[in-house]
Amino acid sequence: MVKKIVTLLLCLSTATFANTPIRHRSVAVTPDDVATQSGVQSRLSAVLQPSTSSIEIPEMLTNLVSETVGAINKMGLIDQRIASDLIEAAKRHIGARYRSGSSGPSAFDCSGFTSYVFRRLGITLKRSSQEQHRQGQAIAKRKDLQPGDLVFFGRRGKSVNHVGIVTEVASDGTFQFIHASTSRGVRIDSSTDDYWSPRFVGARRIIGADI
């Protein structure tokens, strides 16, 4: 009698499993999976949904870029402040007379003036305009000039024999510069002046550059 009951139960269970549809055939179920619909769905969710680490990486990169840009901007602001202080210090000497070989504070030649003003801010320049023309970073285009840059002039626009400090720059690349002129002492002139325009040789950036 017991054997008949066991046999009947086995037949019923076999029929039940045979009639139950198999779901999620495409999912590979490992031995430790629970053979239930909810168990398989949870495994699917883990596969289909992005992991937390895949979201954190872009955020980390974004934060790194933001910090880098912030540092660059901060340095830019520091350089602007130095340039502003430099020009302010230079303008205090407007009207000082020109004297060859002098480097202030009552009289200057051109490179003596630039070296004196930069030295007030702890930046050491070479003594001659030719040597200063080899310091810092070369500026290829006038439109890239900034206040505080050194500008150089020479005969026929070639050999350097004069130097000044940029005070203002227009959008077209023309600029104002302060310098110790041989005829009128320390003053501000324009790069568009008939005398200076054909004599422009080039420019160098000292502030924020290796010298």
Image (tube, rainbow, N blue to C red):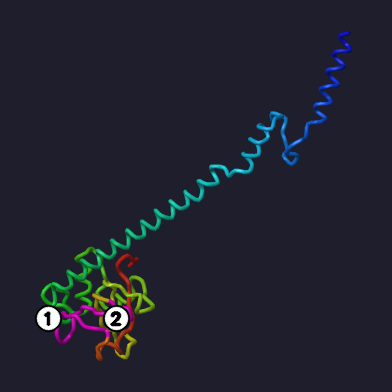
Residue 113 placement (x, y as % from top left)? 19, 75
- Of callouts 1 and 2, which one flags the residue occurring earlier in the amino acid sequence? 1
| Amino acid marked by disc 1 | Arg
| Amino acid marked by disc 2 | Phe
Question: Is residue 184 part of the magenta span, yes or no?
Answer: yes
Q: Where does label 1 land, which residue?
A: 97
Residue 67 placement (x, y as % from top left)? 39, 53
Q: Where does label 2 land, which residue?
A: 152
Q: Nearer the viewer, residue 59 or 100?
A: 59
- Which residues are the magenta region? 169-191
Measured Cα–Cα span from mark 1 to mark 2: 20 Å
Specify whether 164 is left or right of 6. Answer: left
CB-based contact (under 8 Å), mark 1 and mark 2: no
Q: Is residue 68 placed above or below 128 in the rendered structure?
A: above
The residue lying at 36 percent from left, 56 percent from top is 70
Q: Nearer the viewer, residue 181 or 195?
A: 195
Q: Quadrant of the C terminus?
A: bottom left
Label 2 secondary element:
strand
Specify whether 207 is left or right of 104. Answer: right
Label 1 secondary element:
strand
**Which residue appears farthest toward the top when viewing the image?**
1
Q: Is residue 105 placed above or below 20 in the rendered structure?
A: below
Residue 116 placement (x, y as % from top left)? 19, 71
